[in-house]
Image: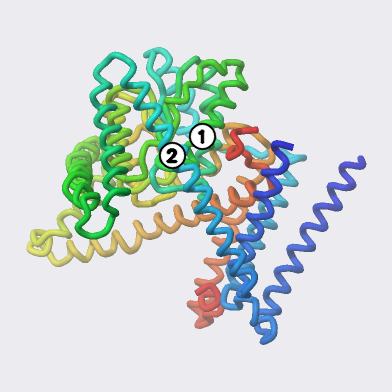
């Protein structure tokens, strides 16, 4: 029973969600809206459980001796401060909550994002080492595209930007579309397996 | 015998119902009365969905009698080696399903199916799994999956709830948190399988920096290019979705993979016919699909 009910619910909901895309009628749209509302409700409940788990995990870290204590204390303090500011003064423009978001969280996020520049360089170094024929093709294509995207390419020859356009529009686009078709078919097959009850990992593998 | 008879009947019924649905969808697309409730402009999509459903279901049914071959995928063959390496090093393994998908996304479902296999293998090796998630629902499903995997090989005591759970919903906050866990716990293998966005390269490069074997796969073509240069093994496109069939050897799931291949052949045929007709000045297929 523990297994059959969720599979039946999943099958009914899966067929309904697929069917509603093709049906334009009031009751079906209303039911679709209700399903979306329930999804939000379930998500919020799960989010509360998730936050509780984060808090418990950080508390355990604080209780354990080690350097992790400091980080966990900061994490817990951050959660507590944002909750107090949010409930105490709201989250509207000019509120302390938004000030903390703009002055603390946004710069930290920008810092993490800026790491990408260094990671792109290190990944490119490893990826572009010409160890075999495919790598040589990759290096050549990358060089042409890099050259074609800066004024130097145009100065060398007008053919360079044109070649860049051809590489992006023909071989790269063909490969991308082939991969996208495969992904689309894979998603469809997975959805059919889930609706048919063959893929049950979302039930914890039961 | 009875099963086979019923089974054959079911197969015929499924085929007939779906075929008639296709015909009905096409026939009512021009009907004014039906147009009140039916989105006629979506008929090509409906036909495509029904065609995909028919072919995948028929392939699954056929797979019960006939075992299909699936070509070896290096990324999946390397899973046991990666787990073995982590075990020898005494390190955990880390599984990341990405920031881009929730449980409603088929990619996340496919990723959880791979996680189920890895959880069983890791439990057999006695290696813990770390699973930081951006989505509390995915985290909950992953907890169940890993716990069940550990229990399946008789090692339920290996499961630690602190290792599997929700981290944050913020994309770069998630990347920072996962990077921190990687740097502190130094996993021997990192699996990046799921829906990834801008955090993909940050995670893949950090995994490389801590000396982990990286096995990756995603449904994002943009992030796929980052994974190809940054990771040791990459599952490209539909390989991610075929992985659960490959790993489990389940004939039904292998049947679905076979269905995908048949659909690809049909798509290629339609493309070639459309191209030839277009060159001859007939654009009916392009207009219908457009």
- The chain letter under disc 2 is B
Where residue B11 appears, as percent x and y from the top left, is 80, 53
The crowding category of the residue bearing disc 1, from other C-alpha atoms within 10 Å (few below 14, some 14 to 19, many at least 20), is: many
Q: Are marks 2 and 1 in contact (CB under 8 Å)?
A: yes
User: Label 2: how many residues lie within 10 Å, few (<14), some (14-19) or many (20+)?
Assistant: many
Q: Circle 1 sits in a helix, a strand or a loop, which is it?
A: helix
Name which residue lies at 73% across and 41% down.
Answer: A4
Residue bearing the label numbered 2? B97
Q: Residue at x 56, y 37 (%)?
A: B113
Of circles 2 and 1, which is in front?
1
Write down the residue under mark 1.
B142
Q: Residue furthest front?
A: A88
Q: SS for tag 2?
A: loop
Horizontally, residue B239 falls left or right of residue A21, namely left
Which residue in the rendered view is the most extreme toward the right?
B2
Quarter-wise, where is residue A63 in the image? top left
* In-front residue for pair A169/B201: B201
Chain to which mark 1 belongs: B
Q: Between marks 2 and 1, how big is the CA–CA gap?
A: 10 Å
Left or right of residue B13, residue A111 in this image = left
Height in image: B265 above or below B203?
below
Residue A59 is drawn in which quadrant?
A: top left
* Up-down relation of residue A143 to residue A174 (above or below): above
Q: Residue furthest bottom?
A: B32
């Amino acid at each position: 029973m523990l297994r059959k009910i969720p599979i039946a619910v999943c099958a009914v909901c899966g067929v309904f969600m697929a069917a509603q895309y093709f049906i334009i009628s009031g009751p079906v749209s209303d039911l679709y809206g209700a399903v979306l509302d329930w999804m939000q409700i379930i998500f919020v409940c799960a989010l509360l459980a998730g936050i509780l788990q984060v808090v418990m995990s950080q508390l355990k870290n604080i209780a354990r001796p080690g350097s992790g204590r400091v980080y966990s204390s900061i994490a817990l303090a951050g959660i507590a401060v944002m909750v107090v500011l949010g409930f105490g003064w709201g989250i509207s423009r000019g509120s302390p909550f938004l000030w903390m978001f703009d002055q603390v969280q946004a710069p930290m996020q920008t810092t993490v994002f800026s790491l990408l520049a260094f990671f792109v360089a290190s990944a490119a170094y490893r990826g572009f080492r010409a160890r075999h024929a495919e790598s040589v093709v990759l290096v050549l294509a990358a060089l042409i595209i890099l050259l074609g995207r800066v004024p130097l390419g145009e100065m060398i020859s007008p053919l360079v930007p044109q070649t860049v356009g051809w590489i992006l529009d023909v071989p790269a686009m063909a490969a991308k579309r082939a991969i996208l078709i495969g992904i689309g078919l894979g998603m469809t097959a997975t959805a059919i397996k889930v609706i048919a009850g063959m893929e049950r990992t979302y039930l914890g593998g039961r | 015998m009875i099963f086979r008879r019923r089974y054959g009947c079911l197969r015929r019924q499924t085929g007939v119902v779906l075929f008639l649905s296709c015909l009905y969808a096409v026939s009512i697309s021009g009907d004014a009365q039906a147009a009140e409730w039916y989105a006629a402009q979506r008929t090509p999509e409906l036909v495509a969905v029904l065609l995909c459903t028919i072919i995948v279901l028929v392939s699954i049914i056929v797979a019960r009698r006939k075992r299909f071959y699936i070509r070896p995928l290096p990324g999946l063959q390397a899973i046991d080696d990666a787990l073995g390496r982590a075990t020898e090093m005494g390190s955990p393994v880390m599984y990341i399903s990405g920031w881009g998908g929730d449980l409603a996304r088929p990619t996340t479902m496919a990723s959880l199916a791979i996680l189920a296999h890895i959880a069983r293998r890791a439990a057999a090796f006695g290696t813990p799994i770390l699973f930081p998630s951006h989505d509390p629902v995915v985290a909950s499903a992953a907890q169940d999956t890993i716990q069940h995997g550990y229990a399946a090989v008789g090692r339920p005591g290996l499961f630690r709830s602190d290792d599997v759970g929700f981290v944050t919903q913020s994309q770069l906050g998630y990347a920072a948190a996962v990077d921190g866990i990687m740097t502190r716990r130094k996993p021997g293998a990192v699996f990046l399988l799921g829906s990834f966005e801008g955090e993909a390269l940050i995670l893949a490069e950090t995994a490389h920096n801590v000396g982990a074997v990286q096995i990756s796969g995603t449904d994002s073509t943009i992030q796929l290019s980052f994974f190809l240069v940054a990771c040791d093994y990459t599952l490209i496109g539909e390989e991610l979705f075929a992985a659960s069939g490959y790993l489990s050897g389940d004939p039904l799931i292998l049947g679905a993979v076979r269905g995908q291949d048949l659909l690809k052949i049909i798509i290629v045929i339609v493309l070639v016919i459309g191209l030839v007709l277009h060159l001859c000045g007939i654009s009916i297929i392009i207009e219908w699909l457009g």
